[in-house]
Amino acid sequence: MSAPMRTDEVIQLEVQGRVGLIRIHRPDAMNALNDAVMNGLRDALDRLEADAGIGCAVLTGSEKVFAAGADIVAMQHMDFAEAYTTDFITRNWERLRTFRKPVIAAVSGFALGGGCELAMMCDMVFASETARFGQPEIKIGTLPGAGGTQRLPRAVGKALAMDLCMTGRLMDAQEALRAGLVSRVLPADSLLEETLVIAQKIASYSLPALMMMKETVNRAFESPLSEGIWFERRMLHASFALQDQKEGMHAFVEKRVPNFVHR
């Protein structure tokens, strides 16, 4: 059964089985990311992380726009002292980065500036054929500040990241797929439906094993190869303490579907 979705909020949260669906809903502002949106996203992620019945999250926007970027109207008069003392961006944007369960961005339409950065914070990006990605901050005299200059080169390489950031041009879904920014391109009219099917499949697997895997893959971007291999090996060893590991291997030997208990 799906939990009811509140429609009076800029962040809408719905639970479908073991999947939490988070929708950015600020249609009057092209889903621009202000404090209300980011605080709402933080609260939704807190709820999903605390719920043992949730194994995966999906973050999406509307068919026309995932998120058009940080809210320029809210930022235009901000000075250095305010940005620094209020810990602008860090105080609420970073919650997605620390979310321990798998999260998929389902991107349709524009994912620009902060919207592109938000998608890159997710573990996987599924794009519709209409998706457009970009970091156009240079056009308003500034630069990405929510990880765009750091995650984009890691995803697509230095040359393409420089191209995108310095020209402000947009990249369509197929170019993003070739470049490695997105993992799948899906039909626009079935993007969310297909994403939710994949999310339910992921959520059916052992949650502790998924969390270990997420932590281990992310370590690849933070460590030298030898350190990453060592960490992977230790996490593999640790997985042998899971009930789900025993169940999974026994089920394989017995040629049956495993019954994971997420412990």
Image: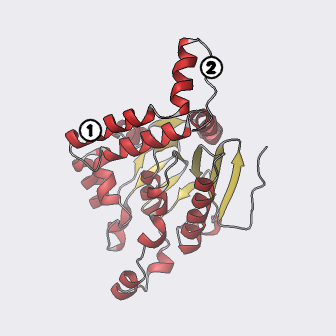
Looking at the rendered structure, the number of numbered marks drawn on it comes to: 2
Pointer 2: residues within 10 angstroms few (<14), some, or many (20+)? few
Q: Secondary structure at mark 1?
A: helix
The answer to which image quadrant residue 232 occupies is top left
Question: Residue 74, position in %: x, y?
Answer: 50, 79
Residue 8 shows in the view: yes
Q: Residue at x 49, y 37 (%)?
A: 209
Circle 2 sits on which residue?
Answer: 257
Task: In this rendered view, identify the residue nearer to me: 169 or 65.
Answer: 65
Residue located at (27% from left, 41% from top): 228
Q: Calculate the distance from the C-alpha at mark 1 to the C-alpha at mark 2.
A: 31 Å
Q: Which residue is mark 1?
A: 230
Classify 252 as above or below 205.
Answer: above
| Rendered position, 84 above or below 3 | below
Q: Is residue 61 visible?
A: no
Residue 70 lies left or right of residue 20; in this view the side is: left
SS class of the residue under badge 2? loop
Q: Position of residue 248 (x, y in %)?
A: 54, 24
Disc 1 marks a residue whose amino acid type is Trp
Q: Name the image quarter holding residue 177.
A: top left
Image coordinates for residue 142, horizontal then vertical, percent: 32, 72
Q: Quadrant of the N terminus?
A: top right
In the image, residue 82 sits, relative to residue 149, either above or below, namely below
Foreground residue among 184 and 172: 184
Marks 1 and 2 in Cβ contact (< 8 Å): no
Q: Earlier in the sequence, mark 1 or mark 2?
A: 1
Q: Residue at x 51, y 45 (%)?
A: 102
